Image: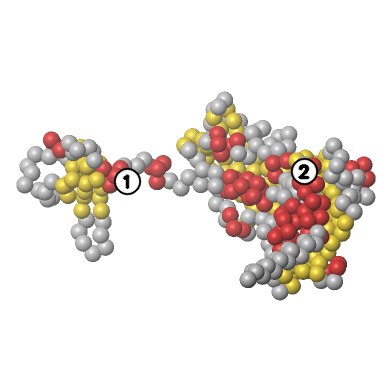
């Protein structure tokens, strides 16, 4: 039966009060006050009742919010699962990226060239998930902040249309406008600077796209040797040599060597340059067919792996990829291991008969 609430910080509305409305019961007001001596709880009361309660501090803090805390901070209302195109204007660099029919990202401008699904996906999500950190102006005008030459302008397109995020920089601060809502908002430097991409950041550096998909056929020419390998009934067979059964671990090493082939640079995107990079008469040719779906076989050409610089290209595509020497040489070594016939195990000598 408390008669004086002041010592507990519960006089009047206390430090924080919450009105609770019930569907089929009278409205109640919960009043939160000062911290208890233990520091982990706060005093509380229900208006109209003489009882003194303690509640965990986090219960009070869960209600102790500003209007901005409750606000939806998303600047765009794009549906991540349905975004099919991204445009990014950084002033000196302009990109347009689109999803192909199989769900892979392609760089359309400048290009077309293959996009890295993870890098482009991260860029798209950075735009879609951009959040305000503060409301600067509800009417869209902020003295000293100009959007005429923005730091970045990004558009994402989903099934509902285009959503645009425009970012301006003033000193160390970044501000944003959204096509989905009026106003100017402050955003974090992390969000703004995550859009500052170079073309190489967005390109697919892997020569093969098969990843860790199941493989049904591999054909490789390297080091003066050639092999066509197919998988039947969980066995790898050398179909170019009468379906001789191969060591599965060695075939997997060969597949891994192809998967690991990745670009360190992109010296040209012109098919006319293939000759000068040793790709019209390649030293290594490798073709991989995935087991599932109806994807076309992927074929990659590699220049002489013993050269100071090694180059590769995907058959039928213009881009020239520079690759590291060691992974390129590993293809020939792995092929040689696959083709090597292991000698039969030595027969054990019969035990000598004991003499009487």
Task: Name the foreground residue: 123 vs 28.
Answer: 123
2 vs 1, front mark: 2
Identify which residue is drawn at 71% across, 66% down.
Answer: 349
- The residue tagged with tag 1: helix, strand or loop? helix
Q: Is residue 224 above or below residue 14?
A: below
Q: Is residue 30 left or right of residue 213?
A: left
Q: Are marks 2 and 1 in contact (CB under 8 Å)?
A: no
Residue, disc 1: 62
Identify which residue is drawn at 81% across, 71% down.
Answer: 243
Q: How is the image coloured?
A: secondary structure
Q: Is residue 215 left or right of residue 65?
A: right
Residue 39 location in percent, x, y? 22, 37
Estimate how packed mark 1 is, as few (under 14), some (14 to 19) or many (20 or more) residues with alpha carbons within 10 Å.
few
Query: Does label 2 or label 1 sit earlier along the sequence?
Result: 1
Residue lying farthest bottom?
233
Distance of label 2 from label 1 (alpha carbons): 57 Å
Task: Name the foreground residue: 14 vs 285.
Answer: 285
Q: Which mark is residue 326?
A: 2
Q: Is residue 64 visible?
A: yes
Q: Quadrant of the C terminus?
A: bottom right
Residue 6 location in percent, x, y? 13, 36
Identify which residue is drawn at 13% across, 35% down.
Answer: 7
Task: Name the foreground residue: 117 vs 240.
Answer: 240
């Amino acid at each position: 039966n408390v008669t004086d609430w002041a010592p507990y910080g519960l006089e009047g509305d206390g430090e924080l009060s919450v009105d609770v409305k019930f569907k089929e019961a009278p409205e109640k007001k919960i009043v939160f006050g000062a911290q208890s001596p233990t520091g982990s709880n706060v005093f509380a009361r229900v208006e109209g009742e003489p009882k003194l309660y303690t509640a965990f501090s986090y219960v009070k803090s869960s209600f102790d919010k500003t209007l901005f805390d409750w606000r939806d901070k998303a600047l765009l209302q794009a549906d991540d699962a349905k975004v099919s195109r991204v445009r990014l204007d950084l002033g000196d660099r302009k990109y347009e990226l689109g999803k192909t029919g199989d769900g892979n990202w392609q760089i359309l401008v400048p290009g077309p060239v293959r996009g890295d699904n993870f890098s482009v996906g991260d860029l798209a999500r950075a735009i879609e998930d951009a959040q305000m950190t503060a409301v600067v102006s509800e009417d869209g005008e902020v003295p000293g902040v100009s959007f005429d030459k923005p730091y970045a302008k990004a558009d994402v397109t989903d099934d509902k249309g285009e959503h645009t995020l425009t970012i301006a920089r003033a000193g160390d601060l970044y501000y944003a406008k959204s096509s989905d809502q009026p106003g100017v908002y402050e955003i974090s430097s992390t969000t703004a600077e995550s859009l500052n991409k170079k073309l190489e950041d967005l390109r697919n550096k892997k020569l093969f796209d098969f990843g860790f998909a199941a493989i049904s056929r591999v054909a490789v020419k390297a080091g003066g040797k050639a092999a066509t390998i197919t998988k039947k009934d969980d066995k790898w067979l050398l179909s170019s040599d009468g379906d001789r059964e191969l060591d599965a671990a060695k075939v997997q090493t060969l597949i891994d060597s192809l998967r690991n082939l990745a670009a360190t640079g992109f010296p040209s995107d012109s098919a006319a340059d293939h000759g000068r990079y040793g790709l019209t008469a390649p030293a290594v040719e490798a073709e991989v067919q995935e087991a599932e779906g109806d994807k076309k076989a992927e074929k990659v050409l590699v220049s002489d792996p013993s050269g100071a610089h090694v180059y590769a290209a995907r058959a039928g595509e213009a881009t020239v990829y520079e690759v590291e020497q060691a992974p390129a040489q590993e293809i020939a070594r792995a092929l040689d291991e696959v083709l090597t016939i292991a000698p039969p195990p030595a027969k054990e000598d019969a035990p000598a008969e004991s003499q009487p």
